[in-house]
Image (cartoon, rainbow, N blue to C red):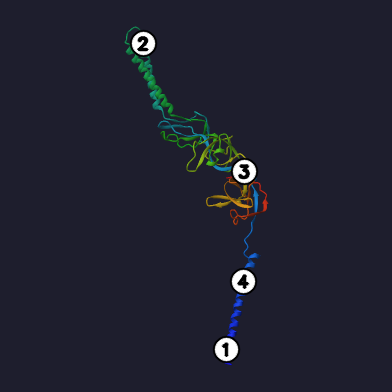
Amino acid sequence: MKLICQNIFFSCILLAGIVSCKSKSAEKQTTQTNQRGGSSSGGGRQQGPQRVDVIIAIPQKITQSIEVPGTLIASETTEIHPEVSGRLTMLNVREGANVGRGSVIAKLYDADLQAQLRKLQAQLNIANQTANRLSQLLKIQGISRQDYDMAVLNANNIRADISIVRTNIARTVVRAPFSGKLGLKEISIGAYVTPQTIITVIRKTNDLRLDFTIPEKYISEAKPGTMVFFKVAGSDVRHAARIMATESGITEDSRSLNIRSRVVGSDPVLVPGAFANVILDFAPNYTALMVPTQAIIPQARGKKLVLYKDSVATFVDVTTGVRDSSNIQVLTGINAGDTIVTTGLMSVKPKSKVIIKNIIKPVQSVNDFKQ
């Protein structure tokens, strides 16, 4: 009886082990089946071609202009100094007045020079009379030729001294070197002045110049004869100037070119030294390729665009030019008619398959680009 019970007990244990093994086998098969089924039903499916929006690169007309700071200057300006030292006896500086060329600005004390001049003139009269008498004696062989030549030489020396004194007297008169407008006077009558003393400043204000600089890449646009426009502070009037000359070389520090232009016409609000906002308009560009700004992918070294070619995303290096709020000009890297991807740029991979979802109509760029 006891033996029978033991056999039954071992049989139950064996049966339980068999059932347990079958359950694990069935569970494993079910898991594998589910995994295969999941793979076929989409749980681990690889994504297909990405759907993107594109735009066709079409040439557009743009008019570009740049704004740079400038300064108005007088065509002629100089400080007025006396040529010699002395005491100022007359000052004819009407501050802010226009004077003509050669007008007397100031006069220095010259009484001593006038006295020297009178003395030399008296000596010259005596020397001339002596030379005339000796000339008569020479004709009758009363004196030697050498005595007569010495008398003539003495008269000529006195004449030279008179010329020197008259020149010094003329230097005591300070005159306007050109027609222009006087500035503020720096001295008063009675002051002792030297050639380093500034009496006033004169400027030729009826023929103004406009000086400004432009970046190196725009040098080809700034040719002599080109018209530029400018505004000054406190006025909305647009004035014109014509480029007359450029500096012979580019400034190395700023990589820019200095330009001088002549202001067309005159206006009381235009004064030398005034700041000017210069506007330089370039010739229209009829072949500019404009793309949306968001289509440009910045890189550590340069910029890229994604082109749609044969259902494949192709990355190309580009260089850009001017831009506005929504578009940017592409200078190199693409051609007219290329299809440019504008959406999904963060997930599109090089040489990956893409499908065009929408073809976006190009937005006409703003006609005036400013930098």
State left or right for residue 166 relative to residue 360.
Answer: left
Amino acid type at mark 2 = Ser
Badge 4 vs badge 1, beta-carbon distance below 8 Å = no
Give yes or no for contact between labels 3 and 2 (Cβ–Cβ under 8 Å): no
- Does dot 3 land on a helix, a strand or a loop? strand
Q: Which residue is mark 2?
A: 135
Q: Which secondary structure, mark 2? A: helix
Q: Would you call the spot at circle 1 few (<14 residues within 10 Å), some (14-19), or many (20 or more)?
A: few
The residue identified by callout 1 is: 6
Q: Position of residue 70 (x, y in %)?
A: 54, 41
Residue 255 higher or lower than 120, as above or below: below
The residue wearing badge 3 is: 288
Real-space CA distance between mark 3 and mark 4, rounded to the nearest whole angstrom: 61 Å
Label 3 packing within 10 angstroms: few (<14), some (14-19), many (20+): many
Q: Amino acid at mark 4?
A: Thr
Which of the two discs, 3 and 4, labels the residue nearer the N terminus? 4
Q: Position of residue 133 (x, y in %)?
A: 36, 11
Distance in Å between CA atoms under marks 4 and 1: 38 Å
Q: Which of labels 4 and 1 is toward the front? A: 1
Q: Which quadrant of the figure has residue 72?
A: top right
Give whichever of discs 4 and 1 has the lower sequence position. Answer: 1
Residue matched to label 4:
31
Q: Amino acid at mark 3?
A: Ala
